[in-house]
Structure formats: C-alpha cells, structure tokens
Amino acid sequence: MSVETKDIIIVGQGIAGSVLALELIKRGKNIIVIDNASLSTSSRVAAGIWNPVVFKRLTKSWMIDELTPCLNEFYSSAEKILGVKFLEERKIAKLFTEEQEINLWKKKVTEDMHDYLSEDILEMHEPTSSKYAIVKQAGNLDTSVFLTATSQCLKVKESYLDETFNHDELKINASGVSYKNILAAEIIFCEGHLVKNNPHFNYIPFKPAKGDVLTISCKQLDIDFILNKGMFIMPLGNHLFKCGATYNWQDLTDVPNPAGKEELVAKLKKLISYEFEVIKHEAGVRPSVIDRRPVIGAHPTHSQLKIFNGLGTKAVMLAPFFAKQLCDYLMEGKELNGEVDVKRFERIY
C-alpha cells in the first residue's frame, strides 16, 4: 500500500468539518477528510437556520455582528466554487403571546437591536391570529445540499475517505501523525457528538442534545418566511415545511423518537388550524458543550491533535468565522478567542 502525504487530516464531514475543509483548501492546504456519513445525522437533518436574535431574552446572539458578514461571504463564495445554491436569506416572523413581549420588542428596537428587529408590529390572521414582528438578517442553509456538494468536491480532489475512523490506528510521532497509509502534520477532529469515542478529547464536558424534526405537507399554509412561536415552521416549497425542534438530553441516538413527534405535532396543532400530513420524521444529536461555546484548538500534550467541535444548534452561523480563526491560528500563529479555546478545559484533562 503506497503512502499518502497530506498536510492535514480532518475527521468528520458535518457542517464543522465541511466548512473547515473548504477554508483549508482555499488557503492551499493538501487535506483529506475521513467520514462515515451514516454515523451521525445531526448536520444533515438540521434546518440550518441562522437567527441573530435570542428570543428568550431578546438580545443579540453571541458575536452576531462579527458572524453575519463572515457567514454571508463564506457561503456565497462556496456556492460559486461548488456550483450549487444552498444559502437563502429569510425573514423570521416572531409571534407574540402577550403585550409585555411587544413592549420589550419596541424598547429593544430603539436600543442596540435596530439592525435585526423590524420596527413595525404587524397583525397576522392566517395561519394563526396573532401580533408579530420580523427578524431581519436571518436565513437558512440547505445543509443536505451543502454537505453533499462538499463531499463531491472532496472526492473529485481525491481528498475524501469514506469510512469510520478507527482511533486505534492513529499513531502520533514527533513530526506529525499517521493513520493507516496516510502521513500528515496534524489531524483535526470534527466528530460532533461522537467525540465521546475519541480517547484524546473525551475529557471535554460536552452536553449533547437530541433534536427531532418533522417535514409536513400542508396545502393551505402559504408563507414565505420562517414562523416562530415555541418552534419553527420553515417553508421548503411545494407545500412542504420543516418543523422543529425538540430537546432531549437522555436519548442520545439518531433514531427518531415517537415522543418527539407527538410533541411537535401537538405544538403544530396549536399554532396552525390547517390539516397537515407528516411526510418525514428525522432526528440528530447536537454536539453542544456545557458552557454553550465551541471548542477549538490543540490537545494539551499532543499539539499535532486539534479539535473543531461544539458548534451545537448555531453551527451554520458559527462555523465560517471560527474555521477562519482556526486557520489563522494554524498558519499564522494568531491567538484563538479565549471563550472557544480548548485550553479552558485543561484543568480537567
């Protein structure tokens, strides 16, 4: 078996691994991505929504002013490179439950939220009767199209290995790492919640959460925005809508949970009065860290080993900015943001 030499091995081709791979290729790095897509469905089944607003407190999402221009630039560029459309700006219609929410919204518009919150309070009659307002600079990434196009690009470049990564076959040496017949200067793990099986990074306190999502058919529902009130309803076209999502911290499998389906159906029936049919029920496990921040950087004792993980529900929004930051760290020696640096967990290594 001939030896392959690469600059970097990436393990995992979810949103994190895909964005990082494209950023490294753009910077001239010779990479290979190792992935078995059937092991984790979180990235592929995700709605891919980015929302600049935290509705619970009606505040800006963490670092959103820096993240938004970066995500728009990255995905727009990736669409041209990959030759397929997967990014779409969408408005989010936030439905109000009580007058207090409306008053808070009006207050925030006049303060630091004017770039993301519309000033007008509107009246909705269909599909539900409610006052609402619009979140601006939001949208979604068609994650399935993006991941498929990225894997095809990697295969054309002979930079993709379709298999389950075996940690027992990873060898660490002074000049880098080797995996089977592949030699590389370093390896970056983007395994999502499967990091629990990684003997080098399983000390990090992840708190994964399973999410169930539904695809429904509803011929009467006619919206061109994402509807939000305790859940999201996102139009897909042809009277199809993606709806979700649940949070389950006990059942950490990718198998759709019947209780999750029941929860979503019950919420939908309260939100819309139209008849609908569940076309598809999917689930995935989000790789969240206990402090709700990404985890990026080098292993405490083996600097050849890196991690890019923990992007959770905001992966679409976070990945472009922090992939760029990780590449700056790798190639230019720039410091990582202290809130995401894996060093914050060295005390428990």
Image: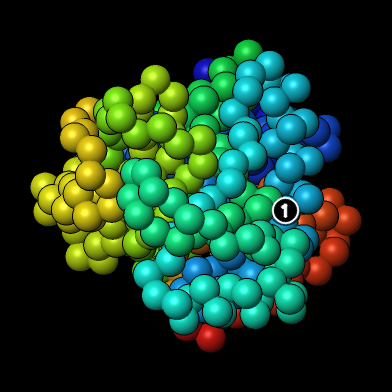
| Image height of 56 relative to 255, above or below | below
The residue positioned 51% from the left and 25% from the top of the image is 145
- Residue at the spot 19% in from the left edge and 31% down from the top edge: 277
| Residue 140 appears in the figure | yes
Rendered residue at 59%/41% (across/down)? 90
The answer to whether residue 156 is left or right of residue 253 is right
In the rendered structure, the answer to whether residue 316 lies left or right of residue 75 reads left
Residue 315 in view (yes/no): no
In the image, 131 versus 161, the foreground residue is: 131
- Front position in the image: 30 or 257: 257
Q: Is residue 94 above or below residue 300?
A: above
Q: Amino acid at mark 1?
A: Thr
Q: Position of residue 117 (x, y in %)?
A: 65, 62
Residue under numbered circle 1: 68
Number of residues whose C-alpha sits closer than 10 Å to that of mark 1, classed few (under 14), some (14–19) or many (20 or more): some
Residue 105 rendering spot, x and y as whole percentages: 58, 73
Which image quadrant is residue 111 in? bottom right
> Residue 300: where, in percent of width, then height?
60, 72
x and y percent of residue 296 in the render? 62, 62
Judge left or right: residue 120 versus residue 37. right
Q: Which quarter of the figure has residue 46?
A: top left
Q: Residue furthest top?
A: 156
Determine the secondary structure under disc 1: helix
